Image (cartoon, rainbow, N blue to C red):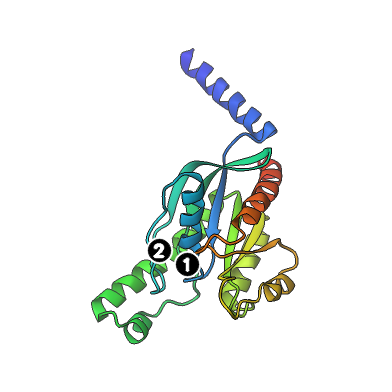
Amino acid sequence: MGLFKRVRESKFSLMMQRVFGKRHAKIGIYGPPNVGKTTLANRILRDWTGDIMGSVSEIPHETRRAKCVTNIKINNGGSSLNMDLVDTPGIATKVDYKEFMNLYGLGKDESRTRAKEATEGVIEAIKWLDDIDGVVLVMDATQDPFTQVNVTIIGNLEARNLPVLIAANKIDAENASPATLKSAFPQHPVIPISALTGYNTENLYSTMIKEFSKKHKKRGSR
């Protein structure tokens, strides 16, 4: 009887969490390689927990396995969002080990290993979408937004009906153009930020609370 009672209590608890939106939202940080995903994850964790997510590098695909930190609470005025944060490997349509050799001076064996792990990381990042409630999609505000990778990611997220917030990163760069990103993807909120310096992250947090709290409750009924 004790087992059945616990099962009933667990189902009731889950139902109440879904109805009232108390369950943690699982938020994924997605985007192409080297747009600042881990830098942003580190910024969020430093601001709210004092911790960091992982190391960063100028060499693409530094993050090759997804990392998740649980039980993060961000606040803005009287509103808050309880979330688990997932930093995912960079999404790429092609990973060529020769680029690591020719562009970044890595050895052949290291380049092959990095390319293999990066490819596996792309697959893992896509699989994580089955368990994600909302996405902070990081884009480089200095680059052309209409890349195959960006369009593919946006299409995948929209097909899954996931709420998307675009972080237009590297706004501190001289040639940054967040307006180009806004015009390219007007269907989603676009917040200009610098994950490196922390510029405008308060606006990012308030938008995360607004978008993911509201839409997470709707998705909670699935």
Residue at the spot x=29%, y=71% of the render? 113
**Label 1 Cα crowd, 10 Å radius (few <14 / some 14-19 / many 20+):** many
Q: Where is residue 210 drawn, in percent x and y?
A: 70, 48
Looking at the image, is 145 positioned above or below residue 20?
Answer: below
- Amino acid type at image mark 1: Gly
Left or right of 108? Residue 215 is right
| Pointer 2 or 1: first along the chain | 2
Q: Which residue is mark 2?
A: 63
Q: Which residue is mark 1?
A: 90
Name the one closer to the observer, 97 or 203: 203
- Specify whether residue 162 is in view: no
Local SS, label 2:
loop
Residue at the spot x=26%, y=74% of the render? 110
- Amino acid type at image mark 2: Thr
Report which quarter residue 96 is drawn in: bottom left
Q: Where is residue 60 drawn, in percent x and y?
A: 41, 73
Name the one closer to the observer, 38 or 152: 38
Residue at the spot x=66%, y=48% of the render? 212
Outermost residue on the bottom side: it is 102
- Are discs 2 and 1 less than 8 Å apart at CB? yes
Local SS, label 1:
loop
Q: CA distance from mark 2 to mark 1?
A: 7 Å
Name the one closer to the observer, 139 or 51: 51
Identify the image quadrant of the C terminus. Answer: top right
